[in-house]
Image (cartoon, rainbow, N blue to C red):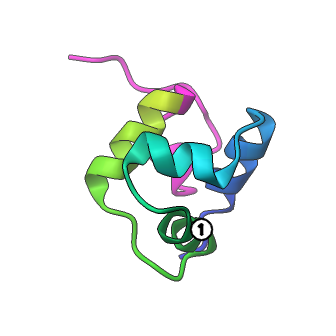
C-alpha cells in the first residue's frame, strides 16, 4: 500500500524525511520505504504520526478523506 498522504502531510508541514524518521526513531531510508509502500509501517508508528499531524489513522491510510482525529477516550 502506498501512503501518499504520509508524503503529502510531511511536505505540507515543511518536514524532511530525516526529521520524521528521527521523530519515529528509525532511519531515513526506513521511513522513505514507509512512504513509498515498500515496507509495512507498524501500528505504533502510525499512531505516532496521527498524533504528530493531528489526523486520524483512517485518514493516513486512505480510508476517509476527513482529517479530524477521533475524540480520545
Quadrant including the C terminus: top left
**Viewer-nearest residue: 31 or 47:** 31
Tell me what residue is drawn at x 55 percent, y 71 percent: 29
In this view, 42 is above or below 68: below
In this view, 39 is above or below 10: below
Please tell me whether residue 62 belongs to the stretch shown in magenta.
yes
Q: Is residue 41 visible?
A: yes
- What's the magenta region? 53-73
Q: Quadrant of residue 62?
A: bottom right
Q: Where is residue 36 in the image (x, y as percent from the top left)?
A: 62, 74
Q: Quadrant of residue 53?
A: top right
Q: Is residue 64 visible?
A: no
Q: Where is residue 63 in the image (x, y as percent from the top left)?
A: 52, 54
- Name the main secondary structure of what is drawn in magenta: loop
Tell me what residue is drawn at x 40 percent, y 46 percent: 24
Tell me what residue is drawn at x 60 percent, y 72 percent: 2
Q: Position of residue 46 (x, y in %)?
A: 39, 49
Query: Looking at the image, which residue sits at the far bottom?
Result: 38
Task: Tell me if 14 is positioned left or right of 5 in this view.
Answer: right
Total marks shown come to: 1
Tell me what residue is drawn at x 60 percent, y 52 percent: 18
In this view, 34 is above or below 45: below
Question: Which residue is denoted by mark 1 in the rendering?
Answer: 32
Task: Tell me if 20 is positioned left or right of 24 in this view.
Answer: right
Task: Tell me if 63 is positioned left or right of 14 in this view.
Answer: left
Task: Tell me if 72 is positioned left or right of 30 in this view.
Answer: left
Please tell me whether residue 39 belongs to the stretch shown in magenta.
no
**What secondary structure is marked by label 1?**
helix
Within 10 Å of disc 1 (Cα), the crowding (few <14, some 14-19, many 20+) is some
Q: Quadrant of residue 12?
A: top right
In this view, 53 is above or below 36: above
**Viewer-nearest residue: 37 or 25:** 25
Amino acid at each position: 500500500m502506498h501512503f501518499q498522504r504520509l508524503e503529502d502531510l510531511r511536505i505540507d508541514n515543511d518536514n524532511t524525511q530525516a526529521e520524521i524518521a528521527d521523530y519515529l526513531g528509525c532511519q531515513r531510508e526506513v521511513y522513505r520505504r514507509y512512504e513509498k509502500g515498500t515496507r509495512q509501517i507498524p501500528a505504533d508508528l502510525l499512531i505516532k504520526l496521527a498524533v504528530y499531524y493531528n489526523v486520524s489513522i483512517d485518514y493516513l491510510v486512505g480510508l476517509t478523506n476527513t482529517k479530524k482525529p477521533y475524540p480520545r477516550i
